[in-house]
Each structure stands twice: as C-alpha cells, then as structure tokens.
C-alpha cells in the first residue's frame, strides 16, 4: 500500500481518491476548493492545506486537474509538487492535458529525479465511482509497472500506450470520438422526434444493432429527458477538442469530422452552456433545426 498525495478533488478526483482509500492506500489530498478537501476527510483521507503538505513524505503523487495551465502551476510552479517532493517519487498526472505539457512535466521531473507518467482516463464520473476507468498511460515501462497496482484500484482497462505524452494523444483520440458520437446520437434524436417516432423506442432498437455504442447505453435516457447535469462539462470537452485539433496539426493530418464537431462544442459553450454535461450538444443540434 502506498502513501499518496492527491491534488485535484473534483468530479473525478474525489471518487478516485475515495477508491484508493478503500483499497488501503494512505491519501493526503489538496484542492483549491476547501469544500472538496472536506469531502476527502469524510471519505477517510487526510486533508492538506497546500500542495507542500499534500505531497510531503508521499511515495506517489497523483494530479487530477482541469487543464495544462493548472498542471503546470501545480507541478512546476513555486511551492509546487516538484519543489516539495524528493528524488524517487512517482508523479502520475491523470488530468487530460496537451501532450506537450506532459513532455515538459516529464523533463522537469527527470531533472529532480522524479519519475513521471501521463495517465489520462476515460469512463466518466460513473467509471470513477465504480473504479472501472480506462487508463491510457505514457512514460517509461518500469514506471508503468510500478504504478500498475494503483491503476488497478481505479480502473479495468489499463494500457501502456507509449512514451511521455502518448497517453494524452490517445485521450485526445478518445475525446474526438466521444464528442462525435454524442453529436450523432443527438442528430438521431432530432430526426426521430421531428418524424413523430418515439425517441425511446427508436434508440432502444438502435442500441442493439451496429449503431450500438456506450453513449447510447449511458446517456440516451438523460438526453431524451433533456437532463444535462454534469458529468463531463462542455467547457472541459471544448478544451479537449482544442487538444485534438492541435495534435492533428502537429502530426500533419486532417481530421474533418473532428473540426465540425469541435465547432458544435464551441457553439454549446458560446451559448452559455459550458457548465452543462457534454450531452447538451443536443441543444445545439436542435437549434440548427429551429427546435
Ligand atoms: P473538475 O473541475 O470537477 O475537477 C478539477 C479539480 O481541480 C477541481 O476540484 C478544482 O478545484 C481543482 N483545481 C483546479 N486548480 C487547482 C489548483 N491550482 N490546485 C489544486 N486544485 C485545483 O474536473 P473533473 O471533471 O474532475 O476533470 C478532471 C480532469 O479529468 C480534466 O482534465 C478532465 O478533462 C478529465 N476527465 C474528466 C471526466 C469526467 O467525466 N468528468 C472524464 C475523464 C477525464
């Protein structure tokens, strides 16, 4: 069992930290929002008032933060993780961020003898609650092997996909697919309802055929009911679509469908729906048809 410093106790991090506590790890956690740190206490963890105290004496540090700027600040900034940890610590960043930032963090960690993995996840809040996440890991093989028992307390599908940053590239591919599939489910709902076909029955039969997918399984009921509580916020998916398009640009490839879907996500955000669940893409698709 490991002594773990956990930074970022939001929608995902709070459940992941709770699962690690249940598995017997000793968790000290920090978040800029004091109420989130309080919740960790209720889950059996130790609250810390700042990063330094969260990571002091830890063998492993896990970060689960919104985006690249927060990871850079928390890890590389003054009184950040690298200043406060000792050589030999394993830093696992599970946030979804730009691959370039993961490379910067890994390089800065190496200078201080801190081993770094990028290990973004997929599976949503339910996956975090049920410890059934998919975890895509970039970094050195021996560091992946060291982290594997911890990943097994958080997820079910755990794959070492390559060197530093590769986990983030796989996550970008995941996110472009998820947003694309949500958009198509939204288009199916609009078509069914506009044609006078019962949406629930229509989606039920679609879920059993070649069009079946996890979004239909997990989100069709809430989409049909127009319930858009997050879940996964449009703001965060907008960030991920930006990462996907920037990654495509640096890889020199064209992803036309991703480009269109990124604009639908941007529209949802521009319309003031950034804090709703990403299934609220349905609102944008409906508005295109004046519905
Ligand atoms: P969230 O906004 O709920 O949680 C992020 C937490 O980080 C918040 O509690 C915030 O207060 C904290 N934070 C921000 N800046 C900080 C700082 N400087 N120091 C300490 N704490 C700080 O987001 P989330 O939904 O938990 O997502 C976290 C990451 O996981 C994101 O990169 C997201 O894209 C990714 N992700 C989310 C989901 C999902 O379904 N929610 C699924 C897979 C991946």
Image (tube, grey):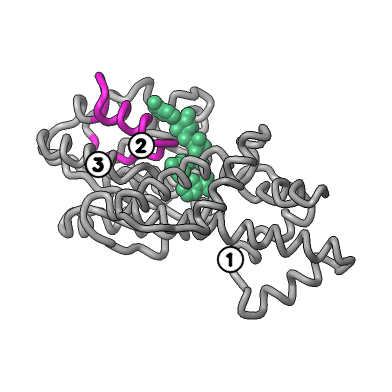
Precedes in sequence: disc 1 or disc 3: 3
Residue that badge 3 annotates: 91
Q: How crowded is mark 1: few (under 14 residues within 10 Å), some or many (20 or more)?
A: few
* Residue 16 visible in the displayed image: yes
Label 2 sits on a secondary structure element that is: strand
CB contact under 8 Å: marks 1 and 3: no
* Residue 131 visible in the displayed image: no
Q: Is residue 13 above or below residue 198?
A: above
Task: Write down the region rendered in magenta.
Answer: 58-81
Precedes in sequence: disc 2 or disc 1: 2
For the residues marked 3 and 2, what is the alpha-carbon distance in whole angstroms?
Answer: 10 Å
Q: In this view, does 68 lie above or below 226?
A: above
Q: In the rendering, which numbered label is found on residue 33?
A: none
Q: Residue at x 28, y 39 (%)?
A: 101
Tell which of 69 and 52 is nearer to you.
Answer: 69
For the residues marked 2 and 1, what is the alpha-carbon distance in whole angstroms?
Answer: 29 Å
For the residues marked 1 and 3, what is the alpha-carbon distance in whole angstroms?
Answer: 31 Å
Q: Does the magenta-highlighted stretch encompass residue 267? A: no
Q: In the rendering, which numbered label is found on residue 214?
A: 1
Task: Tell me where residue 26 appears, x and y as whole percent.
Answer: 33, 41
Q: In this view, does 91 lie to the left or right of 196?
A: left
Residue 228 placement: quadrant: top right
Q: Residues within 10 Å of mark 2 (few under 14, many from 20)?
A: many
Q: Name the front one of labels 2 and 1.
A: 1
Label 1 sits on a secondary structure element that is: helix
Task: Tell me where residue 237 appears, x and y as whole percent.
Answer: 52, 45
Residue that badge 2 annotates: 6
CB contact under 8 Å: marks 3 and 2: no
Tell which of 126 and 290 is nearer to you.
Answer: 290
């Amino acid at each position: 069992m490991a002594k773990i410093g956990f930074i970022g106790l939001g929608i995902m991090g709070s459940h992941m930290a709770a699962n690690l506590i249940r598995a017997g790890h000793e968790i000290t956690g920090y978040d800029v929002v004091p109420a989130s740190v309080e919740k960790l206490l209720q889950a059996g963890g130790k609250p810390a008032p700042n990063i330094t105290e969260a990571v002091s004496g830890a063998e492993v540090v896990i970060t689960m933060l919104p985006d690249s700027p927060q990871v850079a600040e928390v890890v590389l900034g003054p009184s950040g993780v690298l200043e406060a940890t000792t050589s030999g610590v394993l830093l696992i960043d599970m946030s979804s961020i730009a691959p370039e930032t993961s490379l910067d963090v890994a390089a800065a960690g190496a200078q201080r003898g801190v081993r770094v993995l990028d290990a973004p996840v997929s599976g949503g809040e339910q996956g975090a609650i049920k410890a059934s996440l998919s975890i895509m890991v970039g970094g050195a093989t021996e560091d992946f092997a060291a982290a594997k028992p911890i990943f097994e307390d958080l997820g079910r599908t755990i794959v070492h996909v390559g060197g530093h940053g590769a986990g983030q590239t796989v996550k970008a591919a995941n996110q472009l697919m998820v947003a694309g599939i949500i958009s198509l489910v939204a288009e199916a709902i609009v078509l069914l309802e506009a044609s006078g076909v019962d949406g629930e029955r229509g989606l039920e039969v679609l879920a059993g055929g070649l069009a079946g997918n996890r979004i239909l399984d997990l989100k069709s009921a809430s989409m049909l009911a127009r319930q858009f509580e997050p879940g996964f916020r449009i703001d965060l998916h907008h960030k991920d679509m930006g990462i996907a398009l920037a990654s495509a640009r640096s890889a020199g490839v064209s992803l036309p469908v991703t480009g269109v879907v990124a604009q639908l996500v941007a529209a949802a955000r521009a319309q003031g729906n950034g804090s709703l669940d990403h299934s609220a893409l349905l609102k944008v698709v409906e508005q295109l048809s004046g519905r």
